Amino acid sequence: MSVGRAPVEGEPLDRGACVLSIDTELAWGEAHRRDGTEGRHRFAAERDVIDRMLALFARYDVSATWAVVGHLFLDACDDDGRGPHPDVVVPDYDWLDADWLAVDPCTDLDADPYWYGRDIVDAILACPVRQEIGSHSFSHVIVDDPACTPAVFDSELRAATALAAERDVALRSFVYPRNKIAQVARLGDHGFRCYRGGRPVAPFAGRAAWQRRALGLADKVQPLGGSAVRPVPGDGDVWNVPQTYLFDPAASPRVPAAVWARRPIARLRQAARHRSLFHLWFHPYNVTSAPDRAFDALERICRAAARLRDADRLDVLTMGDVAAQLDARADVSTH
């Protein structure tokens, strides 16, 4: 076996898999930052791009995972004198002076549309092509900080799953706010089967440093087997469905969208060749910053995925689909 075709770590899939996960958080994602800065994302444009994305996914028969902050399941909430959501245990971060939930306006969707998102949940559920709703916690807590104790994280997961259950949504996939991963084993206690994690091993792991450098350069031109990514078991028997590519074409504004899309499409084809994973993730604000450019690139990726799927070389799956496939295989192997 050649150096560039080293075995891929993790669980091989039935076929290569294309997974899209979208962190859906509106103002909750920008409410608290450790460095004290404030985000300047175009919240007002997010609903429009979400509708356009759903229409695009319907056109290409793409099922995606929408990681929704639990509070967005609401269209209203109030303060009964005990503070917002008194049943939710809040973290006491040493870098935050105010109460964690002090940002909650305790109003409704009409008054504060960036803090409530029941209409967004409705749109996702109404998409003619099945979409998965996953969790992005209840209030976008930073889980890897010591202040997010097990009691805080359990409370966040309970609140999120309860609100989802009111809409007959069973949450199975979790995306950590800001990708700060911790307390993975607790996810299984609340019914989750997978989370979006990082690459389990570095590309071309186990090779000499000079080989990794040479292979890395070659891999940028034509993705090699040694950089492919597959799901792996996480703590508590919950699957890590690793992210592999951030969708952010606006970060390279001088590169035409058609050129920018070549690299993710090459990774998509790599997944088809190696029964591995192409996991594209982003926020709606990665699209609102340059929507025409972003939709040009996203449509190219969806079109390429659909062609590989129609050729029986690739499956277009949600995170939950990946976990279900691996769970089913594990059940067969134990009987």
Image (tube, grey):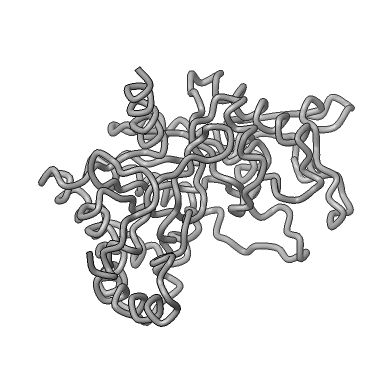
- Which quadrant is the C terminus positioned in? top left
Q: Which of 105 and 192 is in front in this view?
A: 192
Residue 215 percent coordinates (x, y): 33, 76
- Which quadrant is the N terminus positioned in? bottom left
Residue in the picture at 46% in, 41% down? 66
Residue 206 percent coordinates (x, y): 43, 66
Residue in the picture at 53% in, 40% down? 234
Residue in the picture at 44% in, 61% down? 246
Q: Nearer the viewer, residue 147 or 60?
A: 147
Count the marks: how many?
0
Say which quarter of the image contains residue 55.
top left
Say which quarter of the image contains residue 328.
top left
Residue in the picture at 28% in, 31% down? 128
Q: Tell me: 173 left or right of 155.
A: left
- State whether residue 109 appears in this view: no
- State whether residue 5 appears in this view: yes
Q: Nearer the viewer, residue 154 or 293?
A: 154
- Please determine whether, in this image, residue 179 is positioned above or below residue 261: above
Residue 331 percent coordinates (x, y): 37, 22
- Please determine whether, in this image, residue 261 is positioned above or below residue 127: below
Q: Tell me: 105 left or right of 332.
A: right
Q: Tell me: 320 left or right of 235.
A: left
Residue 59 percent coordinates (x, y): 22, 43
